[in-house]
Image: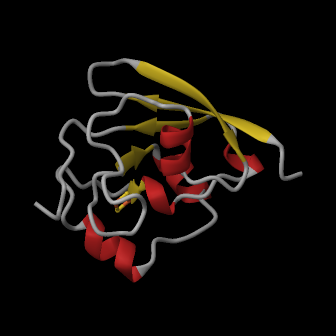
Amino acid sequence: LKDEKVKVCFVLNDGKRLEAEAKIGDTLLDVVVNNDLNIEGYGACEGTLTCSTCHVILKQEDYDRLPEEPSDEERDMLDLAYGLTDTSRLGCQITLTKDLDGLEIIVPETINDARS
Ligand code: FES
């Protein structure tokens, strides 16, 4: 089961769609790194919950089917992201499950590094 793959798609603000294959258990940040996806400034803190550059926006139905609720730490960091929405999450905190195959991830226009 560990080697099973799902497909996800990052949608950039210029309309570009970056499709990627991901292993179950990977975070969205892992997917960006492992597939060398060209998303400017994404994941600056490497998943240590200190930057908010991995901010992503999900469709409501996708947001609702994520297996895990955001932690307090994630919420605090999300508050520092630009363009926060009700369906915002941090990509480094979303772990892919089989159920999330076909997930569409909207990358917000402005990426804010909370450390700067
Ligand atoms: Fe920095 Fe997610 S990569 S908070």
Horizontal and vertical percent for residue 77? 28, 69
Tell me which corner region of the image, top left, top right, bottom left or bottom right, holds residue 50.
bottom left
Residue 66 horizontal side relative to residue 89, left or right:
right
Is residue 72 positioned above or below 87 on the image? below
Label count reads 0
The colour style of the image is secondary structure
The residue positioned farthest toward the bottom in the image shown: 72
- Identify the residue shown where x is 34% and y is 33%: 39
Horizontal and vertical percent for residue 12? 34, 27
Check the picture and name the quadrant holding the C terminus: bottom left
Is residue 80 positioned above or below 88 on the image? below
The residue positioned farthest toward the right in the image shown: 1
Looking at the image, in which quadrant does ligand 1 appear?
Answer: bottom left
Q: Which residue is at the front of the view, 104 or 46?
A: 46
Q: Which residue is at the front of the view, 52 or 67?
A: 52
- Identify the residue shown where x is 57% and y is 54%: 27
